[in-house]
Amino acid sequence: MSYTLIGKHEKDSRANRDGYVSAMLELMEQDKSIVHIDCDLMGCINTGKLLKAFPEQTFNAGIAEQNAMGVAAGMAATGLKAFIHSFGCFASRRAFDQAFLSAGYSQLPVHVIGSDPGVTAAFNGATHMPFEDCALYMTVPNAIVIDSCDYAQTYALTKQLAKQPGLSYMRLIRKGFTTVYADGSEFEIGKGVTLRDGTDVTIVASGILVDEALKAEEQLAAKGISARVIDMHTWKPLDEELILKAACETGAIVTAENHQVSCGLGSAVANVLTEKCLVPQERIGIQNQFGQVGPQDFLMEQYHLLAADIVAAAEKAIARKH
Amino acid sequence: MDKKQKMQQLRVFAAEIRLETLKVIASRGFGHVGGSMSMADAMAVLYGEIMNVDPKNPRWEDRDWFVLSKGHGGPVMYATLGLKGYYPMERAYTLNQPGTDFPSHTDRMKTIGVDLTTGSLGQGMSEAVGAALGNKTQGRNNHVFVAVGDGECDEGQIWEAAQFAAHYKLDNLICLVDDNKRQLDGAVADVMGHGKGIGAKFDAFGWNVINIEDGNDVEQIYDAIQAAYQVKGQPTCLILNTTKGKGATFAEPSGAHSSQPTQEQWDEAIAASEAALAAIRAQK
Ligand SMILES: Cc1ncc(C[n+]2csc(CCOP(=O)(O)OP(=O)(O)O)c2C)c(N)n1
């Protein structure tokens, strides 16, 4: 694992979906057993490029996610490695029984890509705004669950997923958000990345919250508080070792996610802490609410997903230390 | 009023719906123009003549129901309901703004006059079937109309709902297929074909099927619904051969699914739509 942090809070000039597509173009070239199945949403994540370059390895299942998931599992059973895409809401909720049994239980290499996670669904509104997609996939024994944050990470993790033997789910931010990493950065599934070292509190974040966590660290530093920042791109299997180390060394944890806190990164971290090292934890994320329509920045404010919210949570967690 | 006058009124209403739909979407600058515009004439017939509704009492028990299962067509519904007086039209111009009651996809908890929530394709069809069964069981003499997309007919749920509706002989249910030949990734025939056709499928599922040659012609739609009313013991499916983006200068030629035209293109489209309305009004 070698990465270069940029973290200047600058908008990524490239869309994350292109990280996925670039990785897939290379993978499909090298390995003819890699296929991509889409559900009438190629236009949204540019997988038309895959269809053009590798028509024998790319399929459009139409607006029929349950069937597409089953088809992906069937193809995987014949020796192929199947990537399948729909919006996160439909890739999880709509096709979940098929993902669970046909792919997960059957131990087949099916890699589900769910685009527009959480508030990034913005103008598509409540019906298209999954705050529970990861939760569903985390219930599948041995499944891998990833919340990627930018172009470079999406690219690198897509490459890693192709090597995985079972079911995985990766969230894909469709557009360009902020650049966290430089191109060529590498990541290991199941291994968190410590982006800033610190001693008073640890912020564990993923996806669009990574950049907010970095901003929060700067704001905390200005107040004389030293915060550690971890990018926990993989929610399952969770990097317990890194969490326990952070808990022991900093004594307080803040988790930050674009997802329901009751069944996502926050709860997964809490599971580890209650069993192995009880320290105060505060959770930034969706608090038992449905999605709604609006611009992403408005939604981040509405659901309290901003750096200022992380700062407040960090101060609260620190105050709760014995 | 004779039928000729009625049809003239519906043509005017359809043109008004088109213009308002464009203005509603233009207020944000981008959105699902294509699938909204193809539905304008059906909306005019339903809300202008066919449906028994009361804008002042939107949840009146004996009303006719309408479910836009292809929920991304929200703007055409907002334009229709606004023109019908469910709410002041300007409110729909808050489309997709923070805190709005007019989201991209139709939502019963948000917009006055929206009967059921849609957006996840396929779901509205089952909801409409349930509403038809629920109304029937309670002895109501009303109808439930549901609009589905031809792409949406890829969903297995459409066909699960279809078999249920035929099994329970829901003759108070009328499904309108907006057969505009396009879905998100392109032509329906290229993305996911429908074998012998969507109409043939509904027929095989036990429905009464009526093919409407021009699904953007209010009179043909009106006549088909009158014919559907005569059929007992079976739900009816109307196949509306429509044009995606109909009447939107920047969307009709390409049949685009969603559009984000320039301000100039918006101005041009709205001017053309205003001119079309004036021309229809002048026909008398
Ligand atoms: C279950 C589900 N899958 C995918 C989508 C994303 N989506 C929205 S509209 C659309 C295409 C719809 O095509 P069609 O039904 O033909 O509608 P129309 O052409 O009339 O707009 C897709 C794939 C969705 N809303 N719901």
Image (cartoon, grey):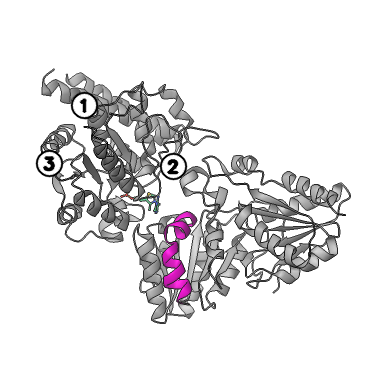
Q: Nearer the viewer, mark 3 or mark 2?
A: 3
What distance separates the C-alpha of mark 1 from that of mark 2?
A: 33 Å
Q: Say few, some or many: other residues with alpha carbon within 10 Å of mark 2 (under 14 / 14 to 19 / 20 or more).
A: some
Say which residue appears at 45% left-offset and 26% top-offset: B91
Marks 3/1 in contact by CB < 8 Å: the verdict is: no
Residue annotated with mark 2: B260
Q: For residue A63, what is the image quadrant?
A: bottom left
Say which residue appears at 56% left-offset and 41% top-offset: A295
Q: Secondary structure at mark 2?
A: loop
Mark 1 or 2, nearer chain start: 1
Disc number placed over residue B232 in the picture, else none: 3
Q: Secondary structure at mark 3?
A: loop
Disc number placed over residue A200 in the picture, else none: none
Relative to B281, say whether B156 is above or below: below
Give the left or right position of residue A194, taking residue A78 as reference: right
Q: Locate residue A131, reporting x and y percent.
A: 55, 52
Give the left or right position of residue A172, taking residue B279 as reference: right
**Magenta-highlighted residues:** A87-106
- Give the dominant element type of the magenta stretch: helix, strand or loop: helix
Disc number placed over residue B49 in the picture, else none: 1
